[in-house]
Image: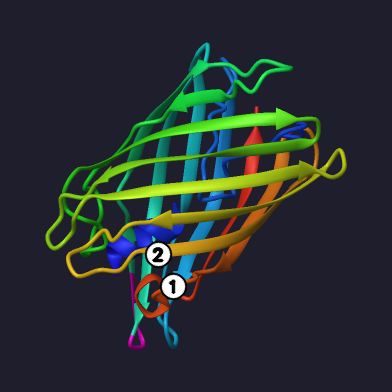
Amino acid sequence: MRATFAFALVLVATPALAGPPYVTDDPEPTDLGKWEVFAYGEGTRFRSHSYEAETGFDINYGAAKDLQVTTVLPVAIEHEDGQMRSGLGDVELGAKYMFIHQQDGTVVPDISFYPTMTLPTAHHGLGSGKVGAFFPLWAQKDIGAWSMFGGGGYAINPNKDAKDSWLVGYAITRQLTDKFNLGAEIYHETADEVGGKPGTGLGLGMVYDLNEKWSILASGGPMLEHRDATGRYAFYMSLAFHD
C-alpha cells in the first residue's frame, strides 16, 4: 500500500498557475532569491476506514536563474483495521531547472527537468527503507488566463516487492478572478509494486489568494480503476507562503 500511496499523492496570483495542488507538476521554478513554503496535508482513502496520509512542509527556493531547489519534510500517517501509526516520513530533495522558455505567438512551451530523490528517513516502517528517485520532464503553455501543463517521468522504486514505474499527467487551469484560480487534471501511473495494479485519477483543484503572500490551495478527486488497490479518492490541501 505504501507504493500506491506515493502515486496518489504526488504539491501567487498570476495569469497561469500550476504545480500544487495538482499531482501533475509544472515547469515553473521559484523566482530567483524567493521562497515558496507549503504547509500541506494530503492523503488517499481506501476501502472501509483505511487511509494513508502525509502532512508537513514543502520548501522551495529560487537558487539561481531558472533553478529551484526543494526540500519536503513529511510526517506520514497510516490507518488500517482500526489501528493508526504515524512518524517521520521519507524526506525528499529535488532541483527543478527550466531550460526552454515559451514564446508568444508560437507553440513552444516552457520545459523543465525536475529530478527528485527520496531519502530513507522514515520511522516505524512508514517509508521504503531505501533511496528512491523520480526523473520527470514537465511542460507548460499559457494562453491568456488559461494554462495547460503536463508531462511525466520514470520512478525508481528499490524497496522490497516494488518495481520501477511511469507517471504521466495533464492539467488545465484558468484564472477566474485576480484571487481565484480553478483547474482540473487527469493522471496515470503504471503498477509500482510486484503484482500491483496501474491507477488513473481525476482531480479538481483551486487556489485562492488571501493576499500577496498567502494562499489556500486544495484539490481532490476519484481514482478510476482498480480502486480497491489504488484507493477510492485522493486529496490535497495547503496554506502557502510566497516571499
Q: Residue at x 33, y 48 (%)?
A: 166
Regarding mark 1 in the picture, which secondary structure is present there? loop
Label 1 sits on residue: 225
**Label 2, label 1: how many angstroms apart (C-alpha)?**
6 Å
Amino acid at the residue labelled 2: Gly
In percent of width and height, residue 164 lies at 22, 50
Instruction: Find the residue positioned furthest to the top.
Output: 65
Q: Residue at x 56, y 62 (%)?
A: 202
In percent of width and height, residue 20 lies at 58, 45
Compared to residue 68, the image places residue 199 above or below, namely: below
Magenta: predominant secondary structure element?
strand
Q: Quadrant of residue 7?
A: bottom left
> Relative to the observer, which residue lies in front, 167 or 87?
167
Label 2 sits on residue: 199
Query: Mark 1 and mark 2 in contact (Cβ < 8 Å)?
Result: yes
Q: Quadrant of the C terminus?
A: top right
